[in-house]
Amino acid sequence: MISNLSFRYGLLFSIFSLLFSCAPEPPAKGAVVSAREEASKIGVAIMKKGGNAFDAMIATDFALAVCYPNAGNIAGGGFAVYRHSNSEMGSLDYREKAPLAAYAEMYLDESGNVIPKKSTFGGLSVGVPGTVAGLEAIHQRFGSLPWKDLVQPAIDLARNGYRVTEKQQQSFESNKEEFIQMNGEHTLYAQNFKAGDLVKNNALAITLERIAEQGSAGFYQGKNAEALISRVQETGGVITFADLNAYQPVWRDPIHFKYKDLDIYTMGPPSSGGICLGQIMKMIEPFDIGQYKQNSLEAVQIMVEAERRSYADRSLYLGDPDFVQVPKDSLLDVNYLNQRMATFSFDRATLSSDINPGTIVWEESEETTHYSILDSMGNAVAVTTTLNGSYGSKVFVDSGGYFLNNEMDDFSSKPGVPNMFGLLGGKANAIAPEKRMLSAMTPTLVLKNGALSMIVGTPGGSTIITSVLQTILNVYEFEMTLQEAVNAPRFHHQWLPDLVTFEPKRFDAGFIQKMQAKGYDIKEEYSRIIGRVDGIHISEENEITTGADPRGDDKAVLFY
Ligand code: DON
């Protein structure tokens, strides 16, 4: 009897669970897409607790500082572009600043030549960090859960450990020599971590506890400030308590421009991202690029030529708006941009030397990280944050468990001499005390017919702007899903060097030959992976889909 009953209940249960498993998933109410699954999950867990997208941002960011130490950070900086559920659009600049003791020629020798590695490796390359102050400012203005609750998941992750991925193992291995050179053999990340190992970072857990207890004062003052400053000074840097005390993030108006039925809101100076993205898209708009196939010869030519012209302007006009006048309106003026494109012909590549003279060397780009967040109330944040190079200056504050940035390299050390991304700059981006170095980071929100439609961004140094551009065009002009748009092969041009870079093995030889026949310089040895785009798309029917870049360990986690 009993067994008969339990058999019947068992049968009923199986039928129910079968029905249940066949039922369609409920529609997602939000999402977090970031460079690491742990961080995305932590962001979603905060939303499940009732937190909003801004709360999730803080928790995700601190989690990335633990489990993505090449770019996630507490001693770097970043930009957030947001849309509040009340429709307010805005941006926060928590970019690093040059120390008070910085000066224009600080990376030059007596003959006026740039000293190799001075602006990229060691204490002198470190900008005054902005991340913790930035996250605190977000919390004070928009946060809904207690600050401590947002830092706690990262404290737990640091204490309990995170798993090393295959890609991370390779990254630790390839940087090991420099870690040791800068920090000695016993430094945490010089240990031979293998994929699957657990990394516990107790020192970082303690630093984060201070931040949880004291807010940004736990970072910019007291024990942490002492440890940071002594580490910077031991490794040749000049940051002082006065620098840490003076650091303030800045709320800025985002760059806004229209492209067909889209309204695009993106980061303004001290990032070049927004102005360049705006210039490039406005130069492309009259060509109705959607009439060509995605990555066809014509489409690539139009984009490359617009990129060339915009990056030339970047090198001359863009810098920290608190120090130099950036002619934003003139640069985005449609007549000016149409006139710039008047010299373009499908027959033949324009030469960068005809746009502006100069020859430079290009170097491999390193790491930054972008994440996109949407909550169920319609708050959206696009955040790009960085140490600049992978693991920044490689200076590790052992007692604090974190790396320091090498953002000073984003300044122009000398006019005409490229930085590590091959980017040129002039007076507008010269070093000065308390100035912010020019960035290419482009966290972006797209509105379609007035409604939120996309949250997007990427790392990739100089290729950030062109990767964001391609993702947007892939979706809105070439009708791809966001994931397809993110996966699609990418290319890049930045005026100088006068080269088009294509992702390796993703464009066929015939296509490359046709480009070369038009006069485009393409060198296979410069081909490399471009960007790691993480985004969220909201359809006109309110369906949420995501794009997490398969080039990294990036992961989208939906919030139901
Ligand atoms: O702000 C910038 O433009 C650079 N510091 C970003 C560096 C970067 O994206 C490196 N990542 N691949």
Image (cartoon, rainbow, N blue to C red):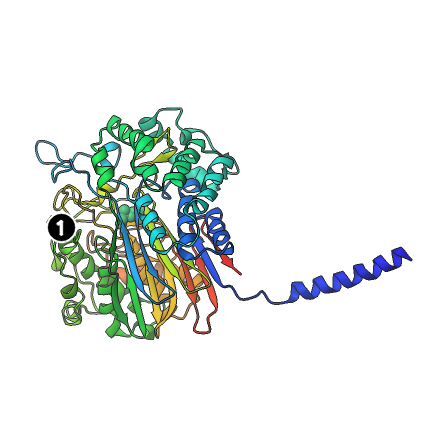
x 32%, y 27%: residue? 181
Percent x, y of residue 263: 30, 70
In the rendered image, the vertical position of residue 217 relative to residue 177, given as above or below: below
Q: Could you tell whether 314 is left or right of 53 in the image?
A: left
Percent x, y of residue 322: 16, 52
Q: Which of 535 and 177 is in front in this view?
A: 535
Q: Could you tell whether 381 is left or right of 107 in the image?
A: right
* Amino acid residing under circle 1: Phe
Quadrant of res 533: bottom left
Question: Which structural element holds mark 1?
Answer: loop
In the rendered image, the vertical position of residue 59 relative to residue 350, given as above or below: above
Q: Could you tell whether 359 is left or right of 263 in the image?
A: left
x 25%, y 66%: residue? 256
In the rendered image, the vertical position of residue 502 relative to residue 193, given as above or below: below
The quarter in which the N terminus is drawn is bottom right
Quadrant of res 495: bottom left
Percent x, y of residue 371: 39, 53
Percent x, y of residue 151: 43, 44
Which residue matches tag 1?
323
Q: Could you tell whether 89 is left or right of 196 in the image?
A: left
In the rendered image, the vertical position of residue 263 relative to residue 427, given as above or below: below
